[in-house]
Amino acid sequence: MIRKFTDTRILIATHNAGKLEEMGHLFAPRGVSVVGAAEMNLPEPEETEDTFVGNARIKAHASAKATGLPALADDSGIQVAALDGAPGVYTADWAETPNGRDFIMAMTKTHDLLEAKGASHPRHARFCATLVLAWPDGHDEVVEGFVDGTLVWPMRGETGHGYDPMFQPVGHEITFAQMPAAEKNAISHRADAFKKLLALCFD
């Protein structure tokens, strides 16, 4: 049985300020206020699953249980067709360094792997986002969003985050990192998942 969201406050299970701000804008028209995991002093749970839904579930349920608030978590990444779907669920791991995440390093690694394989152009890729909305009693709802595109090199654009500078969505001549935030947020994988979540739990 699908559960409708009836609260006025939702915990976003992220320590990423950019993601929290993005979610805040998306929820504002619904009269729902957001609070982040960092504000609630929640630790970041270890993501031990090998699927987007598995990791999103870990984060959502840990946050809901710890705070008594409904919690929304996402797990997202990029799947590169010529790399058999890698980095996928390990997208953030490819960027890990002792001093934090370096996505220029991760994008360079991805490009180098494609070159080494002699991957043909266009180099297809897909951004995926899985959202899990969990309640303190253990119930959850799951939706998935996608946006397809191709990888470009060299990187282009200054905005966005992660792999945005090398991802050009289908039907566009520019990368996510060259788009104004509002334009990107309207067509992103997270926006696709969010629309599905609204239809499922809010409308």
Image (cartoon, rainbow, N blue to C red):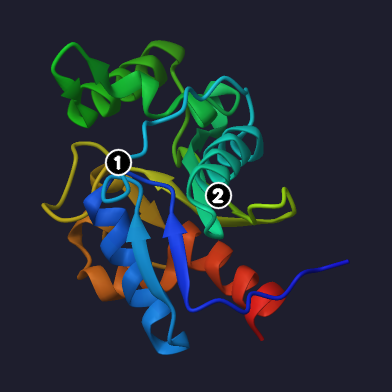
Q: x, y (%) of residue 199?
A: 67, 79
Mark closer to the chain start, 1 or 2: 1
Q: Secondary structure at mark 1?
A: loop
Give coordinates of residue 159: x percent, y percent. 15, 56
Q: Is residue 85 above or below residue 25?
A: above
Position of the C terminus by quadrant: bottom right
| Structural distance between the alpha carbons of marks 1 and 2 | 13 Å
Circle 2 Cα neighbour tier, 10 Å, few/some/many (<14 / 14–19 / ≥20): many
Q: Position of residue 2 (x, y in %)?
A: 81, 68
Tag 2's secondary structure? Answer: helix
Quadrant location, the N terminus: bottom right
Q: Amino acid at mark 1?
A: Asn
When the figure is inspected, residue 76 is found, relative to residue 48, above or below; the finding is below
Question: Does residue 175 sit above or below 65 in this rendering?
Answer: below
Q: Nearer the viewer, residue 123 or 99?
A: 99
Image location of residue 111, percent across then percent down: 32, 24
Can residue 126 be seen from the camera position used here? no
Q: Residue at coordinates 40% horizontally, 21% vertically from top-left?
A: 114
Q: Which residue is mark 1?
A: 41
For the question of whether residue 195 can be seen, the reply is yes
Horizontal arrangement in the rendering, residue 19 relative to residue 142 (left or right):
left
Mark linked to residue 165: none
Q: Which mark is residue 64?
A: 2
Residue 185 lies in what quarter of the image?
bottom left
